[in-house]
Image: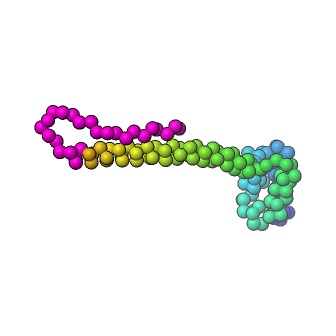
Amino acid sequence: MSGAADERDRIRAAMDRILTGRPERSNGALTVVALALEADVPRNALTQRHLDLKNEFYAKVKERGQPTDAETRLRKQVVRLKELREKDKAELEQLRADVQGLVRVVNQLTLENRQLREHPFTRDPVVRVFPVQHTPPKPS
C-alpha cells in the first residue's frame, strides 16, 4: 500500500472514531487538529494533501447539526467580551460623570481663590465669609 493511500485510510478511520465518540489518540474535538492527531498524520496532510477528506470531515460534522468545538469556544468568548464591554461602558459613563463633578469643584475653588487674592488681608481679626455658589449633585 502506498504512503498516501495508507494516510487516507488512517484519516478515514480516525474520522469514524471521532464522529462516533470513540477517539483513541486525540481529545475527540471536531477539529482538523484533533483529526490529524487521531490519524497520526501531520496537520498539513489534511490542509494540503487531503483537502477532500478535511472537507468531508467538516461536512459530516455539519450534518450532525452540532457546532464545532472552535465555534462553541468562540461563541463563549463573544458572550464574555460583550459582558466585558457593557461593564466597561458603565465604568466609562461613571468616570465621565466624575470628571464633570471635579471640573465644577475646580471652578468653584478657582473662584474662591481669586476672591481671596483680590481682597487684601487686613490686620482685622474678622473672618469674612465669601458667597458660595452651590450646585446640587446630579443623581446617579
User: Residue at point 38% right, 43% down?
Assistant: 105
Q: Position of residue 40 (x, y in %)?
A: 75, 54
* Residue shown at 49% from the left, 39% from the top: 138
In this image, 16 relative to 47: left or right?
A: right
Residue drawn where x is 79% and y is 45% of the image: 23
* Foreground of the two, 7 or 54: 54
Specify the quadrant of the image occupied by residue 12.
Answer: bottom right
**Above/below status of 3 relative to 73:** below
Whether residue 136 can be seen here: yes
Quarter of the image that includes the N terminus: bottom right
- The image's colouring method is rainbow
Q: Quadrant of residue 45?
A: bottom right
Q: Is residue 26 visible?
A: no
Count of numbered circles in the view: 0
Residue 71 versus residue 12: which sits nearer the camera? 71
User: 68 left or right of 127?
Assistant: right
Where in the figure is residue 73, as x and y percent of width and height?
Answer: 70, 47
Horizontal and vertical percent for residue 28? 77, 46
With 83 as the anchor, is 96 left or right in this view?
left
- Main SS of residues in magenta: loop
User: Is-magenta flag for residue 118?
Assistant: yes
Work out which residue is located at the far left of the displayed protein and give it: 123
Percent position (x, y) of residue 136? Answer: 45, 38
Please give the range of residues in magenta.
116-140
Which residue is depicted at the point 31% across and 47% down?
Answer: 110
Is 139 placed above or below 8 here?
above
Camera-side residue of 100 and 38: 100
